[in-house]
Each structure stands twice: as C-alpha cells, then as structure tokens.
Amino acid sequence: MSDTSGVVISAAVEGIVDEAVIRRLIAHAGAASDAVYGRQGKRHLRQRILGYNEAARRTPWVVLVDLDNDNCAPPLRDAWIPVPPAPGLCFRVAVREVEAWLIADADGLSQFLHVARTRVPRDPEALVDPKNAMVNLARASRLWDLREDMVPHQHSGREVGRAYSSRLIEFASSSWSPEVGSRHSDSLRRAIECLQRLVENAG
Amino acid sequence: MRFSRVQLKNWKNFAQCDVRIAGRVFLVGPNASGKSNFLDAFRFLRDLASDGGGFSEAVRRRRGVGAIRCLAARQEPEVEIRVTAETRGPGSQWQYLLAFNQNKARRRPEIIREKVLLNGKTLLERPTDTDRKDPELLKQTNLEQTGTNKDFRELVSFLASIQYLHIVPQLVRDPDRSVGRPNDHFGGDFLVKIERTPKARQEASLRKIKDALSIAVPKLAEIKLEPDSRGTQHLLGKYEHWRPQGAWQNEEQFSDGTLRLMGLLWVSMETGGPLLLEEPELSLHSEIVRYLPQMFARVQRRTGRQFLISTHSPDLLSDEGIALDEVLLLRPGGKGTEVTPASEFEEIPALLSGGSTLADAIVPKTRPDHAEQIALFGDK
C-alpha cells in the first residue's frame, strides 16, 4: 500500500531500526511519513513525550517505545502520559523490543538471515531479550557477511555487531511483511490497527 | 594486512604509547591532544616506504627531529616507532622498529636502530658492522632501498599503501590543482585520480557514488568527468531543478559537503592499505554522519581495508555497533598524551547498560579543561 490517503504522520521512536519499522508501518497503513524524531534512546523520548502529545492535537503522530522489562503496556502509557492523551496520538509499545516485530515474520527473516525457518522463535512476544535472540539467529547464518555484520566480536563490549542496525534497517524496509508479523505479535497487530484508525480519522 | 599494535616513544605528543589497533579505529580527544599526530606516525611510515620518500625526506617534511620529538621529553632522547602488522587469519606477523635522533656532530637525522621481524624471527637488525664503518648508511632505512629490502618487500608495499585523506574542498576547486601535487591527501589531485581510473571502472564508480550521494543530495541525477578546452578535468553534476532538462554544475559550484562526501565514497570503493581519515564528519549533515561507522564496517568486511579515523562527532560515536576496543581516547597530561582504549574504562559498560550511548559515555572524557572560559573571550 502507498500513501494513497494523503495523510502525513509524524513519528518519535527510540532508535534508527525503530525508525525504519515505523516508516514501513506508516506506509503499510496508506499514509506518508513526515519527520521521525527522537532516536536517542528511551529516556530521550520520555523527556519529550508531552510535547509530542501536544503536537498530536494538531497533526497525526505515532510514538513507538519498547516495553523492555516493564510488565505490561497500559501502565507504561499512563506513566508516560499523565495528561489526557491527544486523539491524534497513537502511542504504541513493542513487546518487548522492536526486534520481536521483525522476528514475527519468521519466513521473511529466515530468508533474509539465511537460517533455517525452524530456528526462528515461534512466539516472539514471549522472548525476554529479542535483540539477543536476533543476534543469536544471525550467529547461525550460513553467510559469513551477515555474521560479520550482525554478531559482535568477542571483547567488543557491545550487544550487537558493527553493522547490525543497517542490516535490520535493510530487512525492515524491504522484505519484512508487517501483515505476516501481525499474526504472530499482538502488539504489532495493535500498532497497525491504531495507525489505520489514525489514517481513517485524519482522512 | 593490517596494523595490530603501535608503540611510540617521544613521537610528538606521545612520550610513551603502546596500544592495540583494531580493524576500525576511532580516535577521540580534545583539540590538540594529538589525534592528527597519532595518524602522522603512520604517514611517516608511508613516507619511508614510498617512492620519492625515504627517511631524510620524511624527517625534513616534518621540520626535523626537534619538531618531531615529544615536547614532554626533558633531554633530547631518541624517537622510536614500532608497529606490528598481521595478515588476516593465521597468517604472518610483521614487526618494524625504527629509532632515530639528530646527530649533532654531523648535523643530520640518523638512524639509531632499525629492525624487521617476521613471525618473531629477525630479518634485519641495524646498526650492522657495515653501518658502523660507514655512518653515511645511517641516513637511510633499509625499507627505502631495493637492494636491501628483498626479504621484506611485502612489509614495504604494505607501508607504502597507507593512504591519508582529509579533503579540503577549496583545493579540489582550485583551478591549478593538477599542477605538481601528486598524491595530495587534501584532495588537490582528487579529479586527476578519478581521471586515471580505467574508463569502465571510472563510470561504474561514479554511478555508484551518484546513487549513494543522491541520499544526501536528492536532486543530484547524474555525475560525470569531462575535460574543458584546456584539458583540465571537471566533475559535472546534473541537478534536477525547476528546469525540465536539469542543470549541470561543476565542482566549483558543488557544496563543501558534496565534495567531501564524494571523496569519502571514492576512497571507500578503492581497495588498498590502511586508510587514515581526518574528521570525516566535517560539513556533513548529522544524519549522514550517523551512518558512516556502519558504512566503514561494511567496506572493511568486504575489502579487509583498515580504517583509522579521528573524530569529534557525537553523532558518529553514538553508533551502537562501535566496539569498545575500537575507540582510542587521547588525553593530554603532564607527561604527554596518554592513549587508552575505551574498553579499559570500567565504568563504560555500566553507563551503556543504563541506556547511555557510547558518545554519552565517552565525550565528557574528551572535554577540554575550562571549555566554559571560551564564552568569556566574548568580553575581551
């Protein structure tokens, strides 16, 4: 689907992979992306959330955050937005990290990473650490290039490899299917529905 | 082949330095902490090994031993550079050591020691008896002499393949640029280099650069190289503006950022020895800068090329794929500048686990003392 609706949506996210995912979802909902804000971690978003909420009284907005180790999404939203949420704001929480949404399209991911389909976790929202699961999947890749880009070297001190994000951005912007993913991730399905409502109401 | 370790004694800002070198290295530190001088140790080695270079010339280009020697050194001790380079996988390990000083009696820089080792075995150790009998020989390293370097030509060509890039857009645009400046790392011969590339590869490379550039410069539709009536080469870019046919501009009209990004993309496509990049973030939009580390990582994975990069950019350092042993922190002190890998700071993993980016964790350590005093200059 392309931006057939003429609706333009602004977004705020935690990082650059989230940006690729949200841009893909906005296009999937038939809208066009405006600027994507934040991308400097969760704390940065939280400090600015009330501004995004205010802006959403004028134009449509989507804010995407990772649930991480919090228990569930509704209390997280109440804690983040203690004022009445703007009707034009779609506040979505990925359970537990945006990587789980990418893992939810198991066929697409197994082809992209060159790993056996059976290795891809079946219940992405049950993963405690989806980013780690993604790195471990890449570790099993048949392609040296992919392993080299996505898996951190020993002693690197980082969770991910040197071109991990750009590899995931490649996947999120091309072969990832939000449609397929939404069948295996409830939080992704809700995000897609929320964006569709935003487009209907704004259109 | 790539460098795996460097040891410096009395080299410019560094009284003593011994660090491991990763395949991709980011040098961070306050102004004048010695980032360029650290890179210059590698350029010095390149000068020793390349045509038209050699030891005396390399020292002369740096205004003599006195200008090279560390200011923190009390007497006038010798300067020493020692590097280890390794081939990929379980290959060979080379070591090269050069110590030199000014010989006051003969008023010239002279070699005090020179050593080449391959897998721990000594291939060369100077001074030899011949050197002692004929001190004239101490004016030259054995790297620069075809007659004496036959056992270690692999090392010589590796050192000669080191490339330094710090494109100064004003020089690329200079109409006299092609006169007498071969291998100009400031970009004076950038267009000549493109011209000398075989036609098919040149066109393919320019097409790839155009595709990449159009991300940063969306209106750019085509680039090509064409000589003017005097034969001087010009880089032409077609911009899709309001005119239906688009408008051609040459390098004089390109923005600083466009020229610098072109230079970066061009060298990233070349295969070759270690690439020394001075502040690649200059003139570029922070959004482009943010993705440079991943571009370098991918180039390195594909070509094996080593990158040594000096930077002040938090955007660049915020990349979550930068390993802690890839970052070298330069901090000036009473005994010269100290070089410490970010992996040696115990607090950094804790900061990262708490949600800090690497830039958040490292940039405050590079803050110049009393930076706030700069504001007061406004009242002077």
Image (tube, coloured by chain):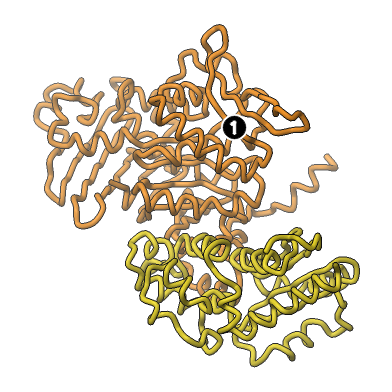
The subunit carrying tag 1 is: B
As rendered, which of A193 and B256 lies closer to the eye? A193
Chain identifier matching the orange colour in the rendered picture: B
Q: Residue furthest top?
A: B230
- Residue B52 image point, x, y percent: 33, 20
- Residue A6 image point, x, y percent: 81, 60
Residue that mark 1 sits on:
B222
Q: Colour of chain A?
A: yellow
Amino acid type, mark 1: Glu
Can residue B12 be seen from the camera position used here?
A: no
Q: Residue at x 82, y 75 (%)?
A: A89
As rendered, which of B141 and A137 lies closer to the eye? A137
Relative placement, left or right, of B221 versus B208 is: right
All told, the count of numbered labels is: 1
- Residue B106 image point, x, y percent: 28, 20
Can residue B237 be seen from the camera position used here?
A: yes
Relative placement, left or right, of B235 versus B323 is: right
Q: Is residue A69 above or below residue B133?
A: below
As rendered, which of B351 and A75 lies closer to the eye? A75
Q: Residue at x 55, y 43 (%)?
A: B212
Q: Secondary structure at mark 1?
A: strand
Q: Is residue B214 above or below residue A82?
A: above
Q: Residue at x 60, y 50 (%)?
A: B289
